[in-house]
Amino acid sequence: MQQFTEDPYRRGRIFASAFYLLFYGAWASFLPFLTIYYQGLGLTGSQIGLLAGLSPVISLVSAPFWTGLADASGRHRLVMSLGLLGTAGGAVLMMQANQLIWLAVAISCFSFFSSAIVPLADSATIHMLGGERSSYGKIRLWGSIGWGLAAPLVGKLIDSFGAKAGFACSAVLILLVLLVSLGMTHSHTRLAVPFWHGVRQVLADRRWYPFLGLAMVGGMSMSVISAYLLLFMNSLGASKTLMGLTQTVATISEIPVLFYVNRLIKRWGARPLLAVSITAYALRAFLVSLAKTPEAILLIQSMHGATFALLVGAGVTLADEMAPDGLKATGQGLYSAMMGGVGITIGAVLGGWIYEHYGAPATFQVTSAIAMVGLLIWLTLGKGLKEN
């Protein structure tokens, strides 16, 4: 016990690992089954699409709001606690809602409170790691483990007790996350200038714009693959078991990349790894467009680690490096808003339109092309990112 309390680095790793394990377990308790829940309530495809689009749009505004509030007030733990309580309440509301308007209210509440939890946790984790901040990936991989463990277990509960059991499990796990989060420490560095003056300094730093643009491209690529891959597999005659295996393969592929991403960052730097991630997304989408059998897609899913895991590990590291002291959470909020807000929204809407009018292969081919164009623009305009 004495060693535990005298070693803040070890203590931080334990709390942060538990946080990601439980938090992503809570997400996996309902997110994979959300469209099934909507279908069970009799919602149409357009109504489901409307609800799916609400979350990233709200996150675009709410993530910078909450992270900015945390940095401005210096009360990061309180802001995170409020977010987790509101998220648990949103899960309960979603479990009770059975009409479109109330589902929209519930998902809006859920998204508003949950949007900044991961950026705040990422900022705290990097702070607790101190000089070992490149080890972030080893901590974040516990989120992949939590997702991989929770999804099949909760799936069995849903088979037995219905879709609402997933929301109940999610709410319980989020409350456990709240208890764990109280053991995490946040940076108490305060800006030497007023908060909004500091934000203007960030916005005046031109390095952020190509970086956030590439984060948007990464989020868009992730969104298209996540939203339309299973629909494509279904059109190829894949069984539900095979579809489930694609999620298993993707999760397994994340773990070694996240475990070794610190070594990769130390050796190559976060900026080149972010470029590798977008290149891999472009290649992955193009290969999917060529697939003629669902088994081929299963093999392509092994690229998930080189895409998503590198996007998260390198992106979080770059956001932390560029954000000035006192605005670390705000930097993570900006990155999360562009990747998880703007990027995912564009991917869902644009991908859906292309899928409907031109089919699945064209959807993934356009995604591949956009990823490569975005990467070339970033490599041209983002040279200043080498200056830390």
Image (tube, grey):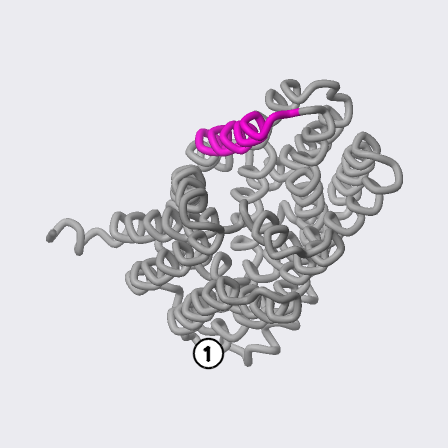
Q: Could you tell me which secondary element the residue under label 1 belongs to?
A: helix
**Where is residue 169 shown, x and y percent of the image?**
39, 54
Q: How many marks?
A: 1
> In the visual, does 156 lie left or right of 65?
left
Residue 2 seen by the camera: yes
x, y (%) of residue 190? 45, 73
Magenta part, dominant SS: helix
Figure check: 245 above or below 103 = above
Amino acid type, label 1: Ser
Q: Tell me where residue 44 appears, x and y as whole percent.
A: 72, 54
Residue 311: name its quadrant: top right
Q: What residue is drawn where x is 60% and y is 70%?
A: 102
Name, please, the residue furthest toward the right. Answer: 357
Comparing 369 with 175, the one in front is 175
Residue 247 covered by magenta stretch: yes
Magenta stretch?
238-257
Mark yes or no: residue 147 visible.
no
The spot of residue 165 in percent (x, y) is 42, 53
Crowdedness near tag 1: few (<14), some (14–19) or many (≥20) residues, C-alpha within 10 Å: some
The residue most toward the bottom is 194
In-image side of 337 versus 16 (left or right): right
Residue at image position (54%, 78%) is: 193
> Is 174 placed left or right of 114 in the picture?
left
- Residue picked out by circle 1: 73
**191 up-or-down from 344: above or below:** below
Q: Nearer the viewer, residue 48 or 14?
A: 48
Magenta segment includes 366: no
Please name whichever residue, 135 or 144, is drawn nearer the observer in this view of the structure.
144
**Residue at x-position 39% and y-position 40%:** 153
Task: Please name the residue shown 54% across and 45% down the image.
Answer: 32
